Amino acid sequence: MPEAEVLTAPLVVEFPFTRSLGPVQSAFLTGLRERTVLGVRTTDGKIMVPPVEYDPVTADELRDLVEVAATGTVTTWAWNPEPRRGQPLDTPFAWVLVRLDGADTAVLHALDATGPDAVTTGMRVRVRWAAERTGAITDIACFEPYESSEAAGQVAPHAGEFTDQVTGIVAPARLDYTYSPGRAQTAYINALAERRTVGERCPSCHKVYVPPRGACPTCGVATTDQVEVGPAGTVTTFCIVNIKARNLDIEVPYVYAHIALDGAGLALHGRIGGIPYDQVRMGLRVEPVWTEGGRYPDHYRPTGEPDADYDTYKELV
């Protein structure tokens, strides 16, 4: 019988990262909104852009803000021929490190250029400001080539005070990738579609892994001997969930538990239903409940059997 094709699927992990800003970062981002680039003077007199609140060498608190120019010099670069979602430009561009005039460190951003032949280390560039600015690094839309002689690099002290200071930011974090569960978990997922739960037994220690991992993490040997387990099992440990998750249509409170299916060598997790949340307990015997067309159990419910003795599942807690 030919081996089943290994599954793959696109996955997206996305969440908003919210953080508050200290006085230095607040001034820097608010300054960008006002088309002003601020740096901070370190203990040894160097100007850091973007600014930080503590000296990276001495750990001293830094508050001496200065204004630097919106022009600078490319110190190094890399061409990006295929921009991805959410990047500064939707046409090919260069990632560049730019040392702004007056600064001693470089800032990373995009350079709008016609091609890699148009980018060189040492070229002069300037900030292209975004048409709408909100107090974020994206207020710098990108850098663009700038024909000028080297600037003198003078800086001016700045109080870092603006009207309506930016005090916090929300940065969306997103990771797009293609996931493959591999041979062992592909067989597990395909079996679930048939309302069966299949694990794999280690040929050395004989533990049955559900879901299977393709190898025994204890013995370090491959697992290929498939074993059908369950469908019933025993609650080993559990928790009561009181906070409703986004995009999950389940009323709180509800119980999420580790369930040791009969014949399995370790517990998997699942939601417990069909019983008041405050009556769920260790040792409760449960069985899967499938929805029409579901590819995995929607939840587990009590079987009506007597509770399992602790000694029968204590090694799986």
Image: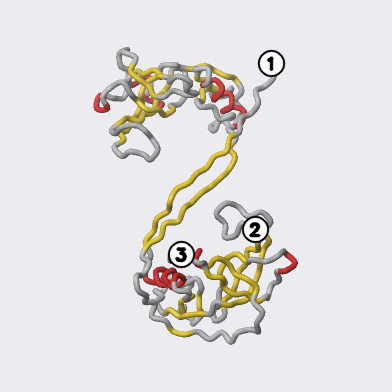
Q: Amino acid at mark 1?
A: Met
Q: Residue at x 57, y 51 (%)?
A: 85
The crowding category of the residue bearing disc 2, from other C-alpha atoms within 10 Å (few below 14, some 14 to 19, many at least 20), is: some
Q: Nearer the viewer, mark 1 or mark 3?
A: 3
Q: Disc 2 marks which residue?
A: 91
Residue 177, placed above or below residue 168: above
If you read the primary sequence from the N terminus, does the residue marked by circle 2 or circle 1 appear first?
1
Quadrant of the rendered image containing residue 101: bottom right
Q: Disc 1 marks which residue?
A: 1
Q: Disc 3 marks which residue?
A: 136
The residues bearing labels 1 and 3 have C-alpha atoms spaced at a distance of 58 Å
Q: Nearer the viewer, mark 2 or mark 3?
A: 2
Percent x, y of residue 254: 31, 31
Q: Secondary structure at mark 2?
A: loop
Percent x, y of residue 112: 64, 66
Residue 59, placed above or below residue 195: below
Drawn side of residue 170 relative to residue 252, left or right: right
Q: Residue at x 70, y 69 (%)?
A: 119
